[in-house]
Image (cartoon, coloured by chain):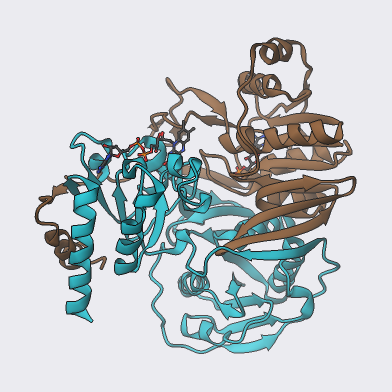
Amino acid sequence: MKILVCISKAPDTTAKIAFTNNNTEFDTNGVQFIVNPYDEWYALVRGLELKEQHSGSVTVLNVGTAENDPIIRKALAIGADEAVRIDVNPTDALQAAKEIATYAKTQGFDLLLLGKETIDYNGSQIGAMVAELMDLPYVSLATKLDMNETTATVSRDIQGGTEVVELSTPAVISAAKGMAEARIPNMRGIMAARTKPLNVVAASGASASTTISSYELPPAKGECHYIDADNVGELIELLHNEAKVI
Amino acid sequence: MSILIYANTANGKIHKSALEAVAYGSKIATDMGTNATAIVVGACDDTDTLGEYGATKVLHANDAKFNSFDPSVYTKAVTAAVEAEGADVIIFSHDFTGKAIAPRVAARLDAGLVSGAVDYPKLDSGFTVRKAVFSGKAFANITINTDKKVVSLLPNSVDKAPVGGSATVETFSPEVGAASVTVKEIIKESTDLPLTEAEKVVSAGRGLKGPENWGMVEDLAKALGAATACSRPVSDMDWRPHHEHVGQTGVAIRPNLYIAIGISGAIQHLAGVNQSKTIVVINNDAEAPFFKSANYGIVGDAFEVVPKLLEAAKAFNAANN
Ligand SMILES: Cc1cc2nc3c(=O)[nH]c(=O)nc-3n(C[C@H](O)[C@H](O)[C@H](O)COP(=O)(O)OP(=O)(O)OC[C@H]3O[C@@H](n4cnc5c(N)ncnc54)[C@H](O)[C@@H]3O)c2cc1C
Ligand SMILES: Nc1ncnc2c1ncn2[C@@H]1O[C@H](COP(=O)(O)O)[C@@H](O)[C@H]1O
């Protein structure tokens, strides 16, 4: 079973969010970057588990520049067999999806796994776009995934419950919480990652269809209005008369 | 040129988030001097309500092949409608269905997509849409540069009052090809609204000590007509179901009222809830970071404060109903 896991780079969850250049660029000063949690914790680990069950290989793919190599090595340390980096810094989801699809089309993967969304741009777009561009079946926000030779059985979140679906491979699946338990790389994995192949391939030249004009920080919250613990009725009154939410 | 809105259904009825999407799309149609058409895919017996929210036409693709949800089949139905209507702007709700098909539609049309929009597009210089980024810690204004434009709207973002029009409903029979995904089973977890669409949410954290103490949280939620949520450690320890986990790695919500009980207010938790319109924090530690993001705060022991709050809410309900 040949599995592709798409990984992206994201700012650490505690990173301070600030902008430069007249609020048109994310200020990366002092920001620590990590593998996007959905990609690492769920998509990658489930990919590795499926390989352990069925044999085969797990390739991780990132569309990005050499700055991303440390997070790609992290994925190799967790257990991926090899990595591919498509050498361009994508500026929107459609551009990244086109690069992923153009590369993956010729590689004969049985399964393409992605995260549910990146925690920086929160797009939740690329998985479905790749599926459409490759004309493959797609399941979004999957919480459970099992495979046999030619079919995948997947549970996905829907309004008020879970839907269990079956589809034939090759297929594209985006992973949400529940699909696997995060793994921490061990010393052996970290050592092995240094010598695993990280192949850099040229981009196909796809262009972006959107541009970010500007960023804004949310308006500061006013002072907290404290209510005495012995007089909680006042809170109900304020929620009704002042905040007008009940 | 026209605006096409994908109107989602649930159990054969138009879903609440679809009314908001139609209201949003028809406002854009008015601003651009054109009409709003809605497309409904699958069985639905109240398609005419969409007229009240501003759609002038409804295309209803109601064939047995749409009975189960296959993103690729639904995508083809929507793009066929885009072609039939000559639509330039296509609107979805950013919910489970929208997340599965809006990007496919965008890829098929080679169109730019803004997902999770929180406001109407600005049309003065191009087509620029605002959305939350960095898990609610900031906003980005994103300009779509392609002729066709796709936008998915974050639920609970714009006003959705009926405008009192009416729509003509037409049967729509697009060519969509064979299904590639077979639905085996649907497991219902609750009949309630999904958390992302709840207008009020009562949430609790590790401060509640154990799952046996959630009775008062559920009672308070019930009295306020709210949904329940929790912090990540609470769902990790299986005190509460996983779909209640809110935050950066859980569900992101923006209700009108968010009440946080015994939650410290870690940055990853705030990331999923800080767009709520009114935040109430109940914590026995006056130094808990959550108070910095709160509109209202009560410093006190949850086991004393919540039962009193429940009584007050019940008294309020009795006086107002
Ligand atoms: C990568 C990453 C992603 C994460 N994603 C999320 C996420 O999506 N969502 C999330 O919630 N967390 C997330 N976390 C975890 C987050 O950092 C915090 O650890 C978590 O939110 C803490 O949960 P809590 O507030 O319930 O518990 P605690 O931090 O233990 O806080 C409990 C609070 O209860 C108060 N308390 C105790 N007893 C009482 C009482 N009797 N009455 C009133 N108050 C009381 C305490 O003063 C304290 O403030 C993430 C962490 C990481 C590293
Ligand atoms: N630059 C990238 N390279 C490879 N995969 C990516 C990249 N960006 C995003 N992805 C994948 O696409 C998923 C969804 O991203 P998004 O649509 O941007 O929210 C992520 O969880 C990753 O699995």
Left or right for B269, reference A84: left
> Would residue B295 be visible to someone looking at this image?
no
In depth, the one of B83 and B105 nearer the eye is B105
Left or right for B151, reference A172: left
Left or right for B150, reference B308: right
Quadrant in which ligand 2 is drawn = top right
Q: Chain A hue? A: brown
x, y percent for residue A156: 66, 55
In depth, the one of A165 and A128 nearer the eye is A165
Quarter of the image for the C terminus of chain A: give it.
Answer: bottom left
> Would residue A92 be visible to someone looking at this image?
yes
In depth, the one of B71 and A47 nearer the eye is A47
Residue drawn at point x = 47 percent, y = 88 percent? B165
Q: Above or below — where is B120 with respect to A32?
A: below
Chain (cyan): B
x, y percent for residue B250: 50, 46
x, y percent for residue A150: 89, 48
Residue drawn at point x = 32 percent, y = 61 percent? B256
